[in-house]
Amino acid sequence: MRKMKQSLIGIFSILFLVANFTGCKIEENPKDKPEDGLQDEEVFEAINPEPFSTRKENLDFIFNNQTLGTTTITMKRSEWNKLCENYRFFYKNENYVHAEKYEYTKDGTTWEIPNVGFRQRGNTSRFCPQGVDNGRLQGQMNADWSADYYTYAEQPNDDYRQVHFKVDFEEFLEGDEELKMAGCMKGVALKRLDHSWGREIFCYDLFHRYGIWTAPRASHTRLILQFVEDETDNSITTIDYGVYEMFEEVNKQSLKGREVGQGTTAENAWANNKGNLWKCANDLTIERMDETGVENIVINFDEEGNRVDWVWDGYSLDLKTNKDDLASAETELRGFITDLNNLPTDGSEQSIATIKEFYEKWFDMDFFLKTYAISILCGMDDDYWGNANNFYLYFDTGKKGTGKLYFIPFDYDNVLGCSIKDGGFKQNPLEWGRGENRPLMDRMLLVPEYKQKFTELLLEVSAEDSEWTYDRAYSQFSYWRSMLEPYANSSDLDWHLGDRYFGDWPWQPSGYSLMNEDNNIFDATRDAIVRNLNGEDVNVSLKISEIECDDGIKVSASYLPDGAYVRKVYLDNAVISDSITQATEFYYPFVTEGKSYSVVVEYLNNSWQTIEKTQPLKIVAKGGAGDIIPNDVSWTFEDNKLVFSSFPTLVTSKESDISYKVCVEFQTSNWASYVGERLLNSAVLDLTDENIIPKEYRNSGIIFKCFARIENVTTDEDWRHIFFDHDNNNPLRVTN
């Protein structure tokens, strides 16, 4: 593992210069306030600049997602060790440790903030940032989240791993003191890079492109951790933590950044920042409306600094503003939930009017519906409608407030085809939820006007000329890859993301992709929306693409319509597979290296009425077992006997032996009834044998297929070589 050590002359000396110029003193006790606070405003502005006059402009500059920032956090090794030890004691803790300095550089501007709070964040995604995993159960694997969960502790060593972090610029200030980066942020959230290198950033950007200004901002940053080795020689160890996604937190500062007068207008801002903001993981039902409070999840220490126990006061409705007036905020929220759940459900004209009155009172309905339309477009299942999770509610109430309630999207990491509900993007968007009680959406969809508007918005945001296109997504993700690739996989880390799944995710359902045009999720989502909402069968044409293969040819089929089946696969007009299947990959070894082949896949549409074929795909084989060469054989039907001119046999162009069995499959005309499959042992087959053609099928039209069932060569697959595929024009008739 590479570790870079530097003397205190350099980075650490700069740290002390910053502290001295600002009147700050670095203390052993991280909770101690700097002696003189941050009194020298001119000096501090030099290290915490505000490039623009409004919060919105500053936030847009900091979170420009087309450029890469660099975050450097300097802290004592003893504080880092405390962070890791806190995790081992109680993984869920939200205790901050003290970092000497936070520094962020972006597009030629550098912000430096001393004495910040630093901690882990996340839920089931938490791991110890340094150490080896000794078998600790994942949270999602332990349903009761019991204390036993924490007994599987990682042990310290020199292995560093990416985990989620949070930085708070005000954690170690006292009283009413404030310290805002660029005058608009009290902290940032840092998430390790996902497999797509930007799924969540892409979705938040999509919200903003569609005018949903309530969504958080996000961009990429490098993360550098500098450890002052205070337990040894005070040298500095620098660990390159790779690339992270940096997010604007949803808090009072984000409310202020969206207030009228902060580079915003009344059309894209709320009236004030004085209302109640709730972080929610709740279905908003009567049964759960009392799950309100102010979250407090911490480790308790004694006077000597020893860990004693922990407090886990977590709430599915967690108040984030006005915490000193919890009772008033609870009254407002519970009143809303009660009224929501008491709305009628009978669909009568009077009931519809009552529901409309409620929603018009609380929501800007066009804005709310558009917010949720984009959420569905992103495939967000871990949200309110799906998992009753990951959203904020902001009551823009008070003397200057509009009185409206805003739904704020949050935590869009399981999106773009990797939602918890596998393949959910293909379902009817008007039935997005999991079939459970979600009154906020259930009641809304009872109103025909809202349902129609919602439908129109879904079609609008997913249209071919919208922001939701494969071309734009491919361009964006490719750009991010080129921007991030030099920094993404740090050699300082024991575990990093790598680029094994760039653009995709191992959970990706049904083979859909972000980056592969032939089966991209953007077109697939659009097609599903059109099909479900317009009642149209969009007749998505099956597409096939080559898969790299060294011992044969292999193709992948995509866009197989729902309910459709592959019927046949042709190789140079010869049938190599004729099993009705929903398989999407086909492999065939009997080809000759360097030879070009034409592959066509034939499929039944979802009504089983029409047979369609793909366009031919030319493939040059890189290897193979040799072409199959059958003997020259014909057949006749005489005296109820199926007679072959010779016994059907196979060899390959490589003159290698093939292990196979010759079979004959019988069906009634038009393949209406399956009669049976029989092994062919001679060139003559007596069809009066009841073991071959049972009596109930005598005098019926019989068709047959003669094929060789070839045993596996390099895989566990079997293949069929078709000798004869008898059609319906001249069926056989077995007489008594």
Image (cartoon, grey):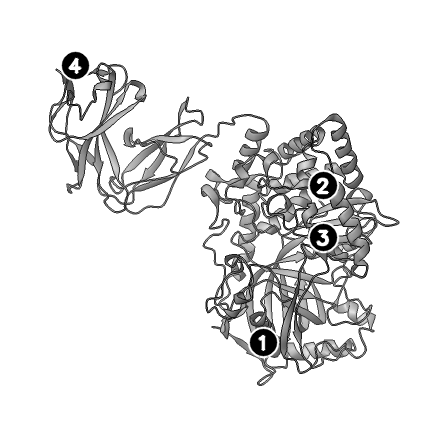
The answer to which of marks 1 and 3 sits earlier in the sequence is 1
Disc ID at residue 341: 2
Quadrant where the C terminus lies?
Answer: top left
Q: Give me the C-alpha separation between circle 4 and circle 1.
A: 89 Å
Q: Amino acid at mark 2?
A: Asn
| Left or right: 158 in relation to 614 | right
Q: Nearer the viewer, residue 18 or 542?
A: 542
The residue singled out by tag 1 in the image is: 81
**Circle 4: residue type:** Asn
From the viewer's perspective, is 171 left or right of 689?
right
Task: Locate residue 433, reporting x and y percent.
Answer: 59, 40
> Tag 3: residue type?
Asp
Distance from the alpha carbon under mark 2 to that under mark 1: 48 Å
Judge the density around disc 4: few (<14), some (14-19), many (≥20) Cα neighbours within 10 Å: few
Residue 290, numbered label:
3
Q: Which residue is mark 4?
A: 736
Which label sits in the foreground, 2 or 1?
Answer: 2
Q: Earlier in the sequence, mark 3 or mark 4?
A: 3
Looking at the image, how many numbered discs can be counted on the residues? 4
